[in-house]
Image: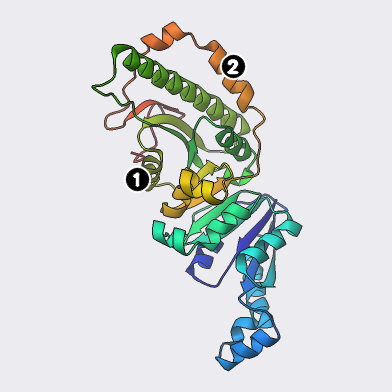
Amino acid sequence: MKIIAALDGSQHSSATLNFLLSYHWPAGTWIKLVHVLPCERGLMKYVMHAFGKENECDTENVSLILAGVAEELTRQMPNVSVSAEVLAGDPVDSILSFAGTFHPDLMVTGCRKKTAVDTFLLGSVSQKLLEGMSCPVAIVRGDSAPLDADKGSNVLVAIDDSEHSAAAVEWLQWQEWMKQSHIALLSVTEPLHHSAMDGVKAASDNLLTYQTDKMLIESLLDKWGTFLQQGGNAREITRGTVDGIPTETILKGAHNWPANLIIMGAQGRTGIAKFVLGSVSQHISTHADCTVLIVKGMESKYYDFERTKILDSMVLDDIAAEKTKPGPSGVPATNWTGSSGHVPPTGLF
């Protein structure tokens, strides 16, 4: 496994290092610590010297510091190879260019929570890396403390009826560093809305569509939960569906549990389409309290087959007669299952 960890010397870098120390990475993992200097040598260094900031262009000084960090990480993770790389230029362009030659399996970068105005007007290095990288990207919060790798972490996996979610689950199955984790698969369904203007047939059709979608996602959750259990890369797996607004419900659930990590699949969006349509994964990665890992660059091998098989097995008469099952007290879930019983993880909602 190959990992790029972007460091800029801020508290976000400390959170990135804490993230790396929080998991048992597979033997032979290669972690590359990358720092990008804000300027080139030559004329720019002369200008920086005039302002008393020549150290910001001191490649040798930064290299020594990073080498010390790499040595300490290697001491604490003896089965992992850690080395450093100092680049110069634009942070995003430099890291993306380096990634093109290093071919990482995971990108890790720090980030502070931003408002919508911050993200739109100023942009964000972490968000731009998320858009530009072709591999999964973990965005670590600046206040993320190190975890006990032996106890594992609480991992909330947001699932919807899409190939991207299926690809995220399939990717997760092969991540040995998740073996001690407590995983909750969560699907959020938009609530069924009734209008006084709806006729009887329209209301009936809406209810049928809602129940069909609900049964489909519950069946997919069962499939993905079984899939992860067979992989053996988790201490415990629970799964459930909840009615609500996806972004709000995922953020609330992650905060209340509390989750240490949110995993989501992402469909690539670019330019104006991203701004107009929005992106649940982008919103979550910007506003979550914990680390968010967006799985990119993966294709699902099983989504189309499993989804078709589920739809073929559905009987419309049974769907129309199906009634929503109440969840545990105070939990707006129609179905929760897991090795700990038919309840969601403690505190999730």
Q: From where the camera sits, is residue 81 visible?
A: no
Please give the name of the residue rendered at 66% of the width and 49% of the height, measured from the top-left corner. Answer: 134
Task: Tell me which amino acid carries mark 2.
Answer: Lys
Task: Tell me which amino acid carries mark 1.
Answer: Asn
Which disc number belongs to residue 256? 1
**Residue 239 located left or right of residue 321:** right
Task: Residue under label 2, please give it.
Answer: 309
Question: 179 and 308: which one is in front?
Answer: 308
Q: In which quarter of the image is residue 81?
A: bottom right
**Residue 253 located left or right of residue 224:** left
Question: 133 and 27: which one is in front?
Answer: 133
**Residue 222 located left or right of residue 227:** left
**Residue 236 located left or right of residue 116:** right
Please give the name of the residue rendered at 56% of the width and 58% of the height, measured from the top-left corner. Answer: 128
Mark 1 falls on what kind of element?
Answer: helix
Give the answer, above or below, for where 124 lies relative to 161: below
Whole-percent x and y of residue 11?
48, 69
Mark 2 falls on what kind of element?
Answer: helix
Quarter of the image that includes the C terminus = top left
Please give the name of the residue rendered at 33% of the width and 12% of the height, measured from the top-left corner. Answer: 201
